[in-house]
Image (tube, coloured by chain):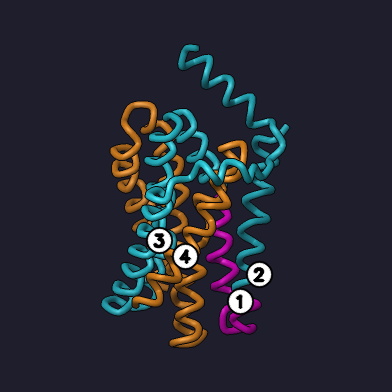
Amino acid sequence: MSAADRERGIAQRVAERPALAPGKLREVRRRDLAYRFLAGALTSIGAGGVTLLFGARVGGILLAFPAILAASLTLIEEQEDSAEAREDARGATMGGLGLALFAAVAALTLGNTSGAVALLLATVAWFASAFLGYLVAWFK
Amino acid sequence: MLIKGLAGGGLVLAFALLSAGLEPKRFAGLFSAAPAVALAGLTIVLLDKGAHDAHQNAVGMLAGSAGMVAYAAAVVPLLRRLHASRAAAAALGAWTLAAAVVAVPVLVA
């Protein structure tokens, strides 16, 4: 199958109903999970360090550093191929828009309501906007 | 700092597992931009420093999330030309540029 045919095949799969396939979890290697844990841990520590050095606003910039996406792309290309990695990145574009809404809702609500409620509202806003964006842009 | 690292790593792992079990890949990609690090970081700042510092973190995050959108958009064409590790590294330029542009008004305000 040519690369172009494969790309078309993947594009058609976008119309599939999103679903959880628990069997795929058994294919995930421990090493890959360790990379992702490390990416998240280092980004969190980096954001904390920058906050200590330059203040909370500057440190906050790193809370949206693409460490998880970068690690995922490398692992997806290794396990599947570049076309699947591109698909993941396309989805992450919509997830990134949701992340901006997460930050906006958190900035508006933190300090005006309880911290738990503020983070819950921000998380709901992230998922709702990313999911809605996915449905509107790609799901036919 | 260690607790932040453990919490951030743990939440990233949880979202990564969720993403790995989802199909199609474009839908799973939504979770590659999940607020895992942000949730861990903001929760610990809330508990340790209070709502004011967490609010400041969230304001700064607006710049980072503009960078995340630019990163994801830039890495798609880069993946056609480069291996994922190089494309992922090259796209950091887009993250830095977009985050810096939005950071100027965010940090000045």
Q: Secondary structure at mark 1?
A: helix
The CA span between labels 2 and 3 is 22 Å
The colour with which the image depicts chain B is: orange
4 and 3 marks in contact (CB < 8 Å) = yes
Q: Nearer the viewer, mark 4 or mark 1?
A: 4
Q: Which residues are magenta?
A: A95-117
Q: Going 49% across and 75% down the picture, which residue do you hit?
A: B42
> Foreground: A42 or B64?
A42
Give the x, y percent position of residue A121.
66, 69
Query: Which chain is indicated by disc 3?
Result: A
The CA span between labels 4 and 3 is 8 Å
Q: Name which residue type carries label 1.
A: Thr
Q: Nearer the viewer, mark 3 or mark 1?
A: 3
The colour with which the image depicts chain A is: cyan
Q: Is the C terminus of chain A in the top left, top right, bottom left or bottom right quadrant?
A: top right
Q: Secondary structure at mark 4?
A: helix
Q: Name which residue type carries label 2.
A: Leu
Q: Secondary structure at mark 2?
A: helix
Give the x, y percent position of residue B85.
31, 40
Is residue B45 shown left or right of residue B90? Answer: right
2 and 3 marks in contact (CB < 8 Å) = no
The CA span between labels 3 and 1 is 25 Å
Against A115, residue B35 (above or below) is above
The CA span between labels 2 and 1 is 8 Å
Q: Name which residue type carries label 3.
A: Gly
Q: Crowding near pointer 1: few (<14 within 10 Å), some, many (20+)? A: many
Residue A109 image label: 1
Q: Name which residue type carries label 4.
A: Gly
